[in-house]
Amino acid sequence: ITFDPEERPGVSNLISIHSILSGKTEEDICKEVEGLDTLKYKYLVAENIISHLSPIRQKILEFVAEPQHLIDVLKDGARRANEMAEVTAQEVRYKLGLEYTAKAGRKVQITG
């Protein structure tokens, strides 16, 4: 296996993917897999991809098994994001000297 994008772009892509997943340099990978044919190398890269993505897959399966937990996490995140957005919006209105309607429905004039 050689890393030559001009000569074998498909193999070069596999080596790049392998490098990203393993943290090894492309040169080191080429030395390690010297003598492997392309098919065997594809299987090796596939195994690396599966190994790398396995924890993500496991987490997804956990979320699917407990959908209410995921819903609760999303609701809590949305609530916290809304709180932060409201604070930011109030700061902007204050700095611009704008009147706005508070959550209780009454108009508030912010002056600096």
Image: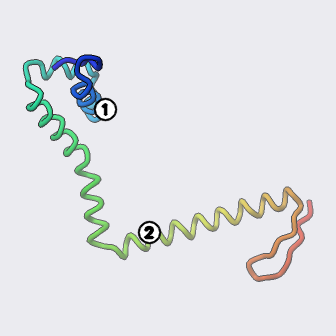
Based on the displayed image, in which of its 4 quarters is residue 80 positioned? bottom right
Q: Residues within 10 Å of mark 2 (few under 14, many from 20)?
A: few
Q: How many marks?
A: 2
Disc 2 secondary structure class? helix
Location of the C terminus by quadrant is bottom right
Q: Residues within 10 Å of mark 1 (few under 14, many from 20)?
A: few
Question: In front: mark 1 or mark 2?
Answer: 1
Disc 1 secondary structure class? helix
Location of the N terminus by quadrant is top left
List the single residue furthest toward the front. 7
Q: Which mark is residue 20?
A: 1
Amino acid type indicated by mark 1: Ile
From the image, tell me which residue sits under label 2.
Answer: 73
| Color theme of the render | rainbow
Where residue 17 sits in the image (x, y, percent)?
28, 33
Where residue 67 sits in the image (x, y, percent)?
34, 73
Residue at 85% across, 77% down: 107
Mark 1–mark 2 Cα distance, whole angstroms, equals 31 Å
